[in-house]
C-alpha cells in the first residue's frame, strides 16, 4: 500500500516536470519575447528566465560592481548575476553564460540541445595536436598523461607501495631498552663532565 502511494506520487511529479519542460519549449512569455532573452527563449527553462529577469532589475543599482553584487546567482544556480548581465543590457545574453543544466528540457540522456556548435571540440583538439608537435619530449609525455587522465580516469601513474606499512600497534621486533628509552642523549658538556669527573 505504501509502495503504491509513493509510486503514484512520483509519477505525478514526473508528469509535472515534463509539463514544465513543454511550457519552457512551446509557450513564450511576453516579457521574454525580444531583446536580451532572444537566444534563450525555448531553449532555457522558464524558471531560469525568471531568475535572470530578477537579476536584470538589479543591474541598474549595481552595474559592473561585483563587490556589491555578491554573485550569489552565479555561485548557486550557474546563471549570470547582475554584474555579468550589465554587459548585455543593450545586447543579447549568450547561451554560453548559462550552466548546461538549464538547457536540458527532457529526461533523455542525449538532449537535442547538446549538438550545439559551441559544444564542438574539434578546434580544441587541433590546438592540442599543434601544441603536441611543437613541444619537446618531456612536454609530449606530460600532454599524453593529461589526456589519459581525461579519457581513462581509471589509469593512473600512482602505484601501491612495495612493502605494507603498519600504521597501528606496537613494534613486534625486540628492541633494546636503551633504544626505547625516553631519556635524552647527554649534551657536549655532559660528555666532558663524565671524562673529567673528580
Image (spheres, rainbow, N blue to C red):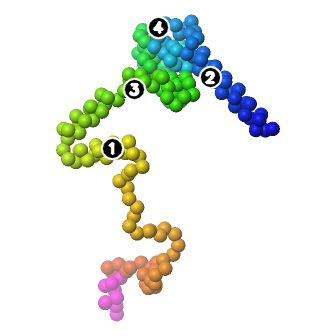
**Residue 193 magenta:** yes
Q: Residues within 10 Å of mark 4 (few under 14, many from 20)?
A: some
Quarter holding residue 47: top right
Q: Residues within 10 Å of mark 1 (few under 14, many from 20)?
A: few
118 vs 75, left or right, is: left
The residue under the point 25% across, 36% down is 129
- Earlier along the polypeptide chain: callout 3 or callout 1? 3
Q: Residue 163 in the image: x percent, y percent? A: 40, 69
Q: How far apart are the alpha carbons under marks 3 and 1?
A: 21 Å
Q: Where is mark 2, residue-wise?
A: 18
Helix, strand or loop at disc 3? Answer: helix
- The residue mark sitting in front, 1 or 2, is 2
Q: Where is mark 1, residue-wise?
A: 146
Q: Where is mark 4, residue-wise?
A: 35
Q: Where is mark 3, residue-wise?
A: 119
Quarter holding residue 119: top left
Amino acid at each position: 500500500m505504501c509502495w503504491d502511494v509513493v509510486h503514484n506520487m512520483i509519477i505525478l511529479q514526473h508528469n509535472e516536470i515534463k509539463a514544465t519542460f513543454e511550457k519552457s519549449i512551446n509557450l513564450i512569455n511576453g516579457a521574454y519575447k525580444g531583446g536580451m532573452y532572444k537566444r534563450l527563449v525555448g531553449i532555457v527553462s522558464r524558471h531560469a528566465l525568471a531568475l535572470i529577469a530578477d537579476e536584470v532589475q538589479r543591474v541598474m543599482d549595481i552595474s559592473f560592481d561585483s563587490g556589491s553584487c555578491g554573485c550569489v546567482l552565479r555561485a548557486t544556480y550557474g546563471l549570470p548575476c547582475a554584474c555579468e548581465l550589465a554587459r548585455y543590457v543593450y545586447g543579447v545574453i549568450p547561451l554560453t553564460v548559462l550552466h548546461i543544466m538549464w538547457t536540458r528540457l527532457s529526461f533523455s540522456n542525449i538532449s537535442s540541445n547538446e549538438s550545439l556548435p559551441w559544444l564542438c571540440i574539434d578546434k580544441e583538439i587541433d590546438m592540442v595536436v599543434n601544441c603536441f608537435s611543437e613541444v619537446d619530449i618531456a612536454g609530449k609525455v606530460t600532454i599524453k598523461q593529461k589526456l589519459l587522465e581525461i579519457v581513462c580516469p581509471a589509469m593512473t601513474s600512482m602505484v601501491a607501495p612495495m612493502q605494507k606499512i603498519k600504521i597501528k600497534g606496537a613494534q613486534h621486533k625486540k628492541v633494546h631498552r636503551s633504544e626505547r628509552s625516553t631519556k635524552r642523549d647527554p649534551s657536549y658538556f655532559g660528555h666532558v663532565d663524565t671524562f673529567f669527573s673528580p
